[in-house]
Amino acid sequence: MLGAPDAALSLTGLTALMTRAQGSPEVAIGLVDGPVAIDHPGFAGARIQHADSHAVCATHSSIACAHGTFVAGILVASRESGAPGVCPGCTLLVQPIFSEQRAAADPGASATAERLAEAIVRCVDAGARLVNVSAAVVNLPSPRSAAALRAALDLAAHRGVLVVAAAGNQGRVGSTVLTQHPWVIPVGACDRRGRPVAASNQAHSFGRRGLMAPGEDIVSLATVGGLTTSSGTSVSAPFVTAGLALIWSMFPRATARELRVAVATAGGRRRYHLVPPVLDAIGLRDAIGQSHHVAVA
């Protein structure tokens, strides 16, 4: 049933954070996903930038358009739209990797390692402070393509650009060339009680440095106007990305490494635990505030 995403926002502490901040235009989020239906009324007033026409939906019924629009709605939709719209004041840089010509038999959000690497580099070069990757790497990449993706993630780390990536929905234990990179923040899906969703992938690296966020029956923007629901780690990741963007907007002098450390130490980590803690946006905000000697009510 469609409705306001209050439960998901409340579980993660985002409701309280959103009462204090809209996000800053200087905090740009790279959206590595499908194209976005920027003509949706829910994006009225949003700061959405794109390099070419491929970033704008040509076929609103395509899987790629639906996926990109839904994720963008969690990130920057108007808060009056019915979508989460966690960080509507932030800038969104759309860098599509999903083709609108995708075969109907291939419903997953997947891309080659080479294409993902290129998109991450473009986002970094365009000035993104964070990159949201709600995608899986298809098949086992060749050593050359895997090296290209690692190099792109190394570049993001060197430039201080946080990369948040969906854990995947295969219900297996193990990471990929994307989520195993030490700079990446992997995000698993939980239900609205904070319990891991069975289909969400798990790994020791996720438990050590990742987070969980709601990924079950989430409401966001549909491509043809109005709202729709979706589930999976693809919709969990943007809650974390947008939450970090809000915190960065509140503490513009904070570094990417400080935010990364706050995430890695959240929730009283247990070194060998497979399941990461649920996003606690207020706890992360307080941790950054303390490191900058700023008291936040």
Image (spheres, rainbow, N blue to C red):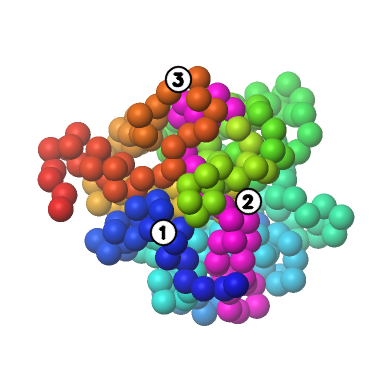
Q: Label 3, label 2: how many angstroms apart (C-alpha)?
A: 25 Å
Q: Position of residue 244 (x, y in %)?
A: 37, 47
Q: Earlier in the sequence, mark 3 or mark 1?
A: 1
Q: Position of residue 108 (x, y in %)?
A: 75, 50
What amino acid type is highlighted by mark number 3? Arg
Residue at the spot 69% in from the left edge and 33% down from the top edge: 172
Cα distance in 3D space between marks 3 and 1: 27 Å
Q: Residue 237: in sight, yes or no?
A: no
Check disc 1 and report its element: helix, strand or loop. Answer: helix
Query: Which residue is rendered at x = 70% and y = 59% of the image?
Result: 64
Query: Residue 265 placed where, x, y %?
Result: 35, 29
- Which circle marks residue 232 in the picture? 2
Secondary element at image label 2: loop
Mark 1 / mark 2, whichever is N-terminal: 1
Can the viewer see residue 101?
yes
Which region of the structure is painted magenta?
Answer: 203-231
Which numbered circle lies on residue 9?
1
Residue located beneath label 3 in the image:
271
Looking at the rendered structure, the secondary structure element under dot 3 is: loop
**Going by the image, does 62 lie left or right of 207?**
right
Residue 122 lies in what quarter of the image?
top right
235 displayed left or right of 208: right
Q: Quadrant of residue 231?
A: bottom right
Q: Which residue is drawn at 16% across and 49% down?
A: 296
